[in-house]
Structure formats: structure tokens, C-alpha cells
Image (cartoon, grey):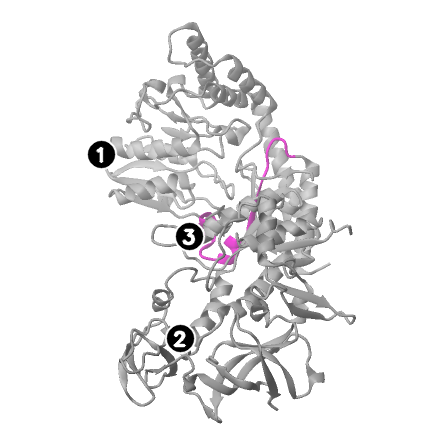
């Protein structure tokens, strides 16, 4: 085995099983491993209970089990400035943002990477399910994790090749059950800890009440595109395109198909609802997106190229043709088949086979060359 | 990896003589000092011999020494029980902005109970002004609690002058001497001190052990209620091995050793200052090096680098220093002491580190520390 003892790897440890096993595996491989817990959000409740404190205890336990030093770093300010402010602004614009994409780009693989380099790190490692391939020219390619259910390249799609230069993803080749198995065999304290759910700062809390602490909700009418009022909504920001749950309207006896959110009009404060999963207002032929980010240069693909795209997490990618606009700041994605619930604010992530090429943020979806009323 | 321990203001390693003595007492003196048979009397003898040694170290009488679980209990007792005993004489207490939490938290509690507390500001050297103190003092003042030496920046308060002012005033004078005891000469009579807190583990003794000095006539109900130990001033069976170890630690400290350590620590500070200057490191000392009786605490602002990253880097090199105090999830909170000295300059309070020396600290350890510190700073600042 190669002597890795002079290679320092700083592992971002969240107190979960994935990052615990990440640190464990690297330590087994003989690296000089240092665990670091990132505190990005102060969620101390009225009883003084803070999940970060509990998670840090787990980091401490696992780190002592593995035999590595561990520290904590506070990025609350960076997170607020670079991620949360963006998150709120997107909601204010009537869009549905993806803070985890920005968190990875700005915090985990920027602020944290800088911190790790200050600690003398050669690499940072995280428990993400993704793989890296370094080609002959030294370029890094980001590949999907081999566990299809767990692949997280969607959230990593705005990392630069330079950032990836300094990264290791030891779990990329592994199915999730294997990770649990390793944790159990190694006797790690987090072996049975359940996976965290949802957006990191909201955790398991009620999303509606969380958001209402930061943004004023303006209730308004819930209606069909035919002008029929079906009820009231609690504030447009609480709804996302294609959503079924929480509308509170039932069948009318003739047509018992469920109701879905099929549009929004921020200027009139109207939430549009329509019947049926396959409601026609939910289907787009193409989308427009900006904030484009390519992991590696894509010039050799030309301005119009074929690839696949995923426009939300945990969705099967679909065949598309990408058209780069001349301004270089926006692009159009034509779907081979109409795509359902293409949501402004979400990332559209491009793939060539297993390779994640990069992503852009969706601005608008179109049907028959008409913009869908989604904002 | 070699360990270099430079956080002696947090705690100190135990002295070999203390360990030997405690081991002996744990094996051989297990009796309860309050019992009347010979096994108990043996424990009682050790307890009272220890009390004599300790009383003598501050020019107090033996029955003015109350053994406690350490600095925090001593501070809590002095403050809360004085308020309890003297609430009919007034409701005003004077302290400083840079006391230890073991003083500030009980005072915050008393404020909730309706007491008025004046927090004297400090100047940029971490010292209060006597004029401010005189202005704050009034007929309602029942307690003045001012630390002898600050734990973060090593500033030395004008204890003697405060004692002089208070000797004809009703207020009792308490000083938290946890960072001063064993390093500075303390004479409770010369300084007119009524109450004084100490801790054994700061002077190479055991943890969870300390004493509260209380002048004869300074009476208050016991903080820990229960048995009649410590002349009814502190309930609980005395921890004889720890108290004996404390006395052993105290008896190791001769006046000569104090002076020698003072000079040695002063030399360490200059060794560090010179090394930083030689390497063009941008830093400022927080507190005073020259003409300061407190030399074991050294606090420096490394401009532009958060203290937590320096601490982590040095830890990876096996070197222990500190900064501020850890709060939630291992994060460091900006120091209230530095904020009091320099205003809300958050850079200065979050970029400062504390190095504190002990009697086992060597020249070569200081060299290794400065080499590592310079290396880390240069790496972070990306200079060669």
C-alpha cells in the first residue's frame, strides 16, 4: 500500500454515518486524517437545544473511535451571506431555490476548503456519493456515484475543476448499505443513526413555519386557469410547481382526479391549480436558464449539443439538446419529450453518460413557445 | 508526537510530590475526618496540618480557611452568601467587566433578584481606574468583588489600593485570586481582603479542590448545606488526599521559586516577541509585559488570522494553547475580556491567542512553539 501518512486529508464530518465512514476509510488507508465539523446555522431552540451540539458530540465520539483529531469551524456568517440570503431572495421572486447546490459551491467546497488548506490539508474529503476521474491532462471529471439511489452529483454540479482538484469522495464507488455495514463492523457510534432529511438548516422542522419567520406570507386566491376560484392559499412561497399535498381541495363528484399546483402569478398573488398528474400546464417543451456553470471547458461541444439533463434531484435524466445563447450568459434546453414540472429556481444539471458536465439555474419553462405561468 | 503544554492558566499538570503524597493518603488515610476513632483522627490531623500550611501562605489564620471544590464554588459562595447575609445593609455590588464567569454568572443571578451591580470598565491594559471605583462606591455597597489577576490577559488589579479604600467601608472585599495564588505574594491583612478564592489545580495540585479565605467576623450561611464540616461553613466529607495534595503543592512554592518563575516567564514572553519580530509577523500584545507581577499569562493578537485556525494547527503539531472559551458545538466565542479592553473590535477578540506558562515549561518548548507558530502563520498568509 502506498504511504499516505504524509498526505493530510481534512474530512468534513457532519455527525452522520456517511462522513463517519469517509473518515474511517481514509484513516484505514493510512492518510493523516483530520475531522472538522462545520457549524453553518444556529438552530438553538427556546429550550437551548441545538442539533449542531448533538451532531458535534457524534463527531467527537466517532473521531475518538477512529483515532483522529477533530475541530469545529463556524461558517454561520458565510452561510447567511452567501447561501441563506440567496435562498430568501429566490423565494421573494416566486422561485423555488436549491440551497444545497449553492451551499456546496460556496461553503463546503470553498469556505471549508480554504479552512482545510489553512490547516495544511492536501485534500478535503466528504461523504458525498460521487466519483472523480482525473484524465491524462490532469483535468477532473465529476462522475455519478455508483449507487443510483444516492448519487449526489446534482448538488455538486457547480464545483469547478480546480475545487475538485483538492477533493476526495471515498464513498463514490459504494452502495449505501455497504457504508452502513462498514460502520457497523468498525463499531462506529453513528452506524445506526438515521440519515438527515431535507435542507440542512431547516432539518426536520416544518418548512412553512420556518419560512414564515423570514418572509411575510401573503395569502391569496387559489384558482383554475379558467377563472374558477377553488379556495385560498397561504402565500405563494409555500407552493411549488407540480405539488399535490397540502392544497385542501377535493374532488367534485364528477372528476375525482387529485388537484395539483400548475402555476403561480406573483404579481396578482394567485396560485393556479389543475386536475390530474398529467395536467397539460405542467409540461414544458423547453426551458431557459442562466447562471451557467461548466465543471470543465465544453467549447469542443459547440454551441448546440446533445446530452441528458436532470432538472430536480432524484429524477431520471432525460434526453435534451442544449443551445448556448450568444451572450454566453444563458442557454436553452430542448426536451426530447415534454418534461413535467420544470421549476424556476431549481438547477438543470447536464450529464454525458455518467459524467456531470455542469448546471444552470432555471428561469422559465415553455410550452408551444409560450412561457408557462410559473412565477 | 511530543506534547507541548502551554495552557497552564486553564490547568496545570500535577507535581510529582503532590502525586506521591495523594497516592499515600488515598491508600493510608481513608478515614472520615469528622469521626472520633483513631482512623478518623488521623484524617483530621492531615486536614488540619494542610489547613495550617495553606493559611500560612496568605498570612491568614487556620480557621479562616474553608476548603471547597475549587475556584467556582469559592466565588459562588463569596458572592451569593454575602448577598444573602448582608441584604439588609444594602443591595449594591461592585465588580469589573473582565471577571471570570464564576463571578459574572452569580452576579447576573443576583441582578435578577433585584441587586444592583456596577461593572467597572477596564482600560486597554485590562486594569480598572481607582477613580471609577471610588465613584461607584456608595452607602449601599455591600460587596466588592475584583479579581487579583486576569485569566486571559494577565492584567493585575490594584488590590492593595482597593483594600485601603475599603478598610473603613461596610463593603466586604472579595478577590478571585485563582490566577494569582501561588504566583504572586498575597497577604490578606496587608491588602485588607475579606474573602479570597483559590483553586489547587492551577498550581500543580489536584482538580476539584480549592479554598475560600474568609476573614474572622465575615460570617454567612453555608453555601452547601448539610453536615457540620468546615465549622458549619461548607458541608460535605472533606477530600483528604486532595486537600493534602493541595497543601503539598503550596509547600513546593517558596518565595525564591516565585521570583524565579516570574523572571523565567518574563523571558519566555520576550523570546516569543523576538521570534515574531524576526519573522515580520504582524502582532500586538494584549495586556502588559513590563512592570507586571503577573507573567504566566501571555495574550497576543495575530492580526488577520482567526484564533481557532491557529489553535487547530498547533494542536496538530502537538502544542496546546487557548483562545476565548468554547461554546456550542466546539466553536469559540469572542472573549468578553478583550471586548471590554478594546471595544467591539471583533477582529481583535477573535484573532487573539493565549499562551500560559507553568513551572515545567522549558526554553526549548517555547522555541518549538514559536517555530510552529511562525510556520502556521506564514502558511496561512501564504508568505515564505
Local secondary structure at mark 3: loop
* Of A247 and B150, the residue lying toward us: A247
Can residue A201 be seen? yes
Residue indicated by mark 1:
B89
Q: Is residue B257 magenta?
A: no
- Figure quadrant of residue A275: bottom left
Residue in view at x 40 percent, y 77 percent:
A92
Quadrant for the N terminus of chain B in the image: top right
Q: CA distance from mark 2 to mark 1?
A: 69 Å
Q: Nearer the viewer, residue A342 or A303?
A: A342
Task: Provide the residue designation for mark 2.
Answer: A243
- Specify start and end residues of the magenta stretch as a single range: B336-361
Residue A50 bears which disc, if any? Answer: 3
Query: What residue appears at the point 36 percent right and 19 percent down from the top-left corner?
Result: B230
Is residue B276 shown to the viewer in this render?
no
Residue B341, position as x, y percentages in the image: 46, 50
Q: Secondary structure at mark 1?
A: loop
Between A6 and B273, the one lying in front of the other is A6
Separation of marks 3 and 2 at Cα, in angstroms = 31 Å
> Which circle, 2 or 1, is nearer the viewer?
2
Amino acid at each position: 500500500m502506498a504511504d499516505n501518512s504524509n498526505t493530510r486529508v481534512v474530512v468534513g464530518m457532519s455527525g452522520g454515518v456517511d462522513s463517519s465512514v469517509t473518515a474511517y476509510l481514509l484513516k484505514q488507508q493510512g492518510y493523516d486524517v483530520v475531522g472538522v465539523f462545520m457549524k453553518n446555522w444556529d438552530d438553538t431552540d427556546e429550550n437551548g437545544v441545538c442539533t449542531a451540539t448533538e451532531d458535534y458530540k457524534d463527531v467527537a465520539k466517532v473521531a475518538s473511535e477512529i483515532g483522529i483529531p477533530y475541530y469545529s469551524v463556524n461558517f454561520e456568517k458565510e452561510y447567511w451571506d452567501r447561501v441563506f440570503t440567496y435562498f430568501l431572495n429566490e423565494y421573494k421572486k416566486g422561485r423555488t431555490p436549491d440551497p444545497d447546490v449553492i451551499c456546496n459551491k460556496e461553503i463546503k467546497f470553498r469556505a471549508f476548503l480554504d479552512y482545510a488548506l489553512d490547516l495544511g490539508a492536501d485534500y478535503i474529503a466528504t461523504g458525498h456519493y460521487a466519483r472523480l476521474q482525473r484524465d491524462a491532462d490532469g483535468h477532473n471529471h465529476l462522475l455519478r456515484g455508483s449507487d443510483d439511489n444516492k448519487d449526489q452529483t446534482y448538488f455538486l454540479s457547480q464545483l469547478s475543476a480546480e475545487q475538485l482538484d483538492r477533493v476526495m469522495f471515498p464513498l463514490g464507488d459504494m452502495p449505501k448499505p455497504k457504508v452502513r455495514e462498514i460502520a457497523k463492523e468498525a463499531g462506529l457510534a453513528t452506524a445506526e443513526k438515521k440519515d438527515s432529511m431535507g435542507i440542512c438548516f431547516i432539518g426536520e422542522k416544518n418548512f412553512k413555519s420556518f419560512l414564515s419567520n423570514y418572509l411575510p406570507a401573503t395569502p391569496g386566491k387559489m384558482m383554475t386557469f379558467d377563472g374558477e376560484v377553488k379556495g385560498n392559499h397561504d402565500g405563494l412561497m409555500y407552493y411549488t410547481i407540480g405539488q399535490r399535498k397540502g392544497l385542501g381541495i377535493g374532488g367534485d363528484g364528477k372528476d375525482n382526479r387529485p388537484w395539483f399546483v400548475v402555476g403561480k402569478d406573483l404579481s396578482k398573488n394567485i396560485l393556479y391549480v389543475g386536475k390530474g398528474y398529467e395536467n397539460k400546464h405542467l409540461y414544458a417543451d423547453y426551458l431557459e436558464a442562466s447562471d451557467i456553470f461548466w465543471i470543465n471547458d465544453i467549447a469542443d461541444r459547440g454551441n448546440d449539443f446533445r446530452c441528458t439533463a436532470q432538472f430536480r434531484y432524484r429524477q431520471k435524466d432525460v434526453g435534451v439538446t442544449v443551445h448556448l445563447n450568444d451572450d454566453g450568459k444563458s442557454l436553452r434546453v430542448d426536451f426530447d419529450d415534454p418534461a413535467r414540472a420544470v421549476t424556476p429556481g431549481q438547477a438543470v444539471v447536464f450529464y454525458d453518460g455518467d459524467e456531470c458536465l455542469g448546471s444552470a439555474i432555471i428561469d422559465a419553462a415553455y410550452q408551444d413557445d409560450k412561457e408557462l405561468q410559473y412565477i | 508526537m511530543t506534547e507541548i503544554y502551554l495552557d497552564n492558566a486553564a490547568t496545570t499538570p500535577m507535581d510529582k510530590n503532590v502525586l506521591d503524597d495523594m497516592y499515600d493518603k488515598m491508600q493510608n488515610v481513608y478515614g472520615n475526618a469528622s469521626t472520633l476513632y483513631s482512623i478518623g483522627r488521623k484524617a483530621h490531623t492531615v486536614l488540619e496540618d494542610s489547613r495550617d500550611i495553606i493559611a500560612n501562605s496568605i498570612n491568614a489564620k487556620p480557621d479562616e480557611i474553608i476548603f471547597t471544590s475549587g475556584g467556582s464554588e469559592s466565588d459562588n459562595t463569596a458572592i451569593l452568601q454575602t448577598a444573602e447575609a448582608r441584604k439588609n445593609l444594602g443591595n449594591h455590588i461592585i465588580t469589573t467587566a473582565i471577571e471570570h464567569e464564576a463571578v459574572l454568572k452569580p452576579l447576573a443571578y443576583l441582578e435578577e433578584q433585584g441587586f444592583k451591580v456596577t461593572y467597572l470598565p477596564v482600560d486597554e491594559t485590562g486594569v480598572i481606574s481607582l477613580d471609577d471605583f471610588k465613584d461607584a462606591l456608595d452607602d449601599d455597597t455591600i460587596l466588592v468583588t475584583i479579581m487579583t489577576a486576569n485569566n486571559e490577559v494577565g492584567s493585575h488589579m490594584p488590590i492593595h489600593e482597593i483594600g485601603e479604600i475599603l478598610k473603613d467601608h461596610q463593603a466586604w472585599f472579595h478577590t478571585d485570586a485563582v490566577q494569582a495564588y501561588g504566583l504572586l505574594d498575597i497577604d490578606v491583612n496587608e491588602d485588607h481582603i475579606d474573602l479570597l478564592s483559590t483553586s489547587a489545580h492551577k498550581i500543580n495540585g489536584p482538580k476539584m479542590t480549592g479554598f475560600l479565605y474568609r476573614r474572622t467576623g465575615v460570617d454567612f450561611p453555608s453555601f452547601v448545606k448539610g453536615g457540620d464540616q468546615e465549622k458549619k461553613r461548607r458541608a460535605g466529607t472533606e477530600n483528604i488526599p486532595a486537600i493534602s495534595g493541595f497543601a503539598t503543592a503550596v509547600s513546593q512554592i517558596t518565595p525564591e521559586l516565585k521570583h524565579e518563575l516570574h523572571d523565567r516567564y518574563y523571558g519566555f514572553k520576550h523570546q516569543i516577541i523576538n521570534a515574531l519580530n524576526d519573522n515580520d509577523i504582524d502582532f500586538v500584545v494584549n495586556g502588559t509585559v513590563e512592570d507586571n507581577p503577573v507573567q504566566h499569562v501571555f495574550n497576543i493578537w495575530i492580526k488577520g488570522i482567526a484564533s481557532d485556525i491557529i489553535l487547530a494547527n498547533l494542536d496538530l503539531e502537538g502544542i496546546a494553547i487557548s483562545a476565548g472559551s468554547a461554546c456550542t458545538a466546539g466553536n469559540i466565542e469572542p472573549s468578553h475580556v478583550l471586548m471590554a479592553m478594546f471595544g467591539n473590535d471583533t477582529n481583535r477578540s477573535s484573532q487573539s491567542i493565549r499562551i500560559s506558562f507553568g513551572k515545567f515549561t522549558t526554553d526549548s518548548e517555547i522555541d518549538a512553539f514559536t517555530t510552529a507558530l511562525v510556520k502556521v502563520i506564514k502558511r496561512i498568509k501564504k508568505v515564505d
